[in-house]
């Protein structure tokens, strides 16, 4: 019983620590909780109400990770929220079903205006589903959130090289635990991260080379 209580306290302490890694402007409407589903993702986000978002964490999988890896994975999810990439309620499937059902019904009663309305609803819902499940968009959203995670890490005291190193390490760890068929998602993110790091390194080197030492004029000459 004491061991179980200790694990619970440790888990609550970790959730509280992560809440402290939220930017101040997000702390009133973004919540951090332990995942409650039977087979949860390591970390994910969910819209829980109007203008409220919850970051859910599988603490059993989370605890073995290095602190720096946890931090950058957490900031990645925060970055997704900042990029407005939060999964919305699955209204698209319901709208698609209603639209298709309406289209069939209007074909039967031959009402042209209602048929066009039903087809338009089906088309819009189908397009939204395509965007939601499009692998390229999912990758681009993840890369944008990775960039946000780097910015947040620097905001919370990481140096730029350490931020890139920590996120890269976290992604490599996720890659190793992912089945071969789904590894390309993490491989592409790592490649984008390497390019971003190289660009940042080049910019820092250029800034150093253009900084001229301050000279003091000899007024006696």
Image (cartoon, grey):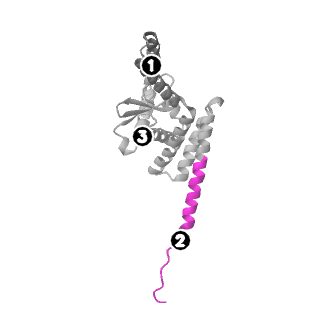
Quick one: SS at disc 2? Answer: loop
Q: CA distance from mark 1 to mark 3?
A: 46 Å
Give me the disc on residue 216.
none
Mark 1 touching mark 2, by CB under 8 A? no
Q: Residue at horizontal 43%, vertical 41%?
A: 82
**Number of residues whose C-alpha sits closer than 10 Å to that of mark 3, classed few (under 14), some (14–19) or many (20 or more):** few
Quick one: SS at disc 3? Answer: helix
Q: What predominant SS class does the magenta segment belong to?
A: helix
219 drawn magenta? yes
Residue 175, position in %: x, y? 61, 36
Mark 1 touching mark 3, by CB under 8 A? no
Can you identify the residue that label 2 sits on?
Answer: 212
Quick one: SS at disc 1? Answer: helix
Residue 109, position in %: x, y? 42, 10
**Number of residues whose C-alpha sits closer than 10 Å to that of mark 1, classed few (under 14), some (14–19) or many (20 or more):** many
- Up the image or down, 196 lies above or below 181; here it is below
Mark before the other along the chain sequence, 1 or 3: 3
**Number of residues whose C-alpha sits closer than 10 Å to that of mark 2, classed few (under 14), some (14–19) or many (20 or more):** few
Can you identify the residue that label 3 sits on?
Answer: 17
Q: CA distance from mark 1 to mark 2?
A: 66 Å
Mark before the other along the chain sequence, 1 or 2: 1
Q: CA distance from mark 2 to mark 3?
A: 42 Å
Q: Residue at horizontal 44%, vertical 19%?
A: 99
4 drawn magenta? no
Task: Please name whichever residue, 218 or 85, is drawn nearer the observer in this view of the structure.
Answer: 85
Mark before the other along the chain sequence, 2 or 3: 3
Residue 122, position in %: x, y? 47, 22
Question: Split into 4 quadrants, where in the image is the N terminus?
Answer: top left
Q: Quadrant of residue 83?
A: top left
Can you identify the residue that label 1 sits on?
Answer: 99
């Amino acid at each position: 019983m004491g061991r179980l209580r200790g694990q619970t306290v440790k888990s609550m302490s970790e959730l509280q620590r992560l809440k402290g890694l939220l930017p101040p402007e997000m702390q009133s409407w973004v919540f951090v909780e332990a995942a409650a589903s039977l087979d949860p993702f390591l970390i994910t986000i969910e819209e829980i109400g109007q203008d409220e978002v919850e970051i859910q964490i599988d603490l059993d999988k989370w605890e073995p990770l290095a602190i720096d890896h946890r931090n950058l994975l957490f900031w990645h999810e925060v970055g997704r929220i900042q990029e407005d990439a939060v999964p919305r309620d699955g209204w698209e499937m319901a709208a698609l079903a209603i639209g298709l059902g309406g289209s069939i019904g209007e074909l039967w009663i031959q009402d042209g205006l209602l048929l066009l309305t039903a087809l338009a609803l089906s088309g819009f819902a189908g397009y939204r589903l395509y965007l939601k499940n499009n692998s390229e968009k999912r990758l681009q959203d993840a890369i944008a959130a990775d960039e946000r995670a780097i910015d947040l890490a620097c905001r919370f005291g990481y140096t730029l090289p350490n931020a890139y190193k920590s996120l890269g390490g976290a992604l490599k760890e996720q890659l190793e635990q992912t089945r071969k068929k789904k590894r390309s998602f993490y491989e592409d993110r790592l490649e984008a991260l390497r390019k971003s790091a190289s660009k940042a390194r080049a910019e820092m080197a250029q800034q150093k080379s253009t900084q001229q030492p301050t000279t003091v004029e000899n007024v006696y000459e």
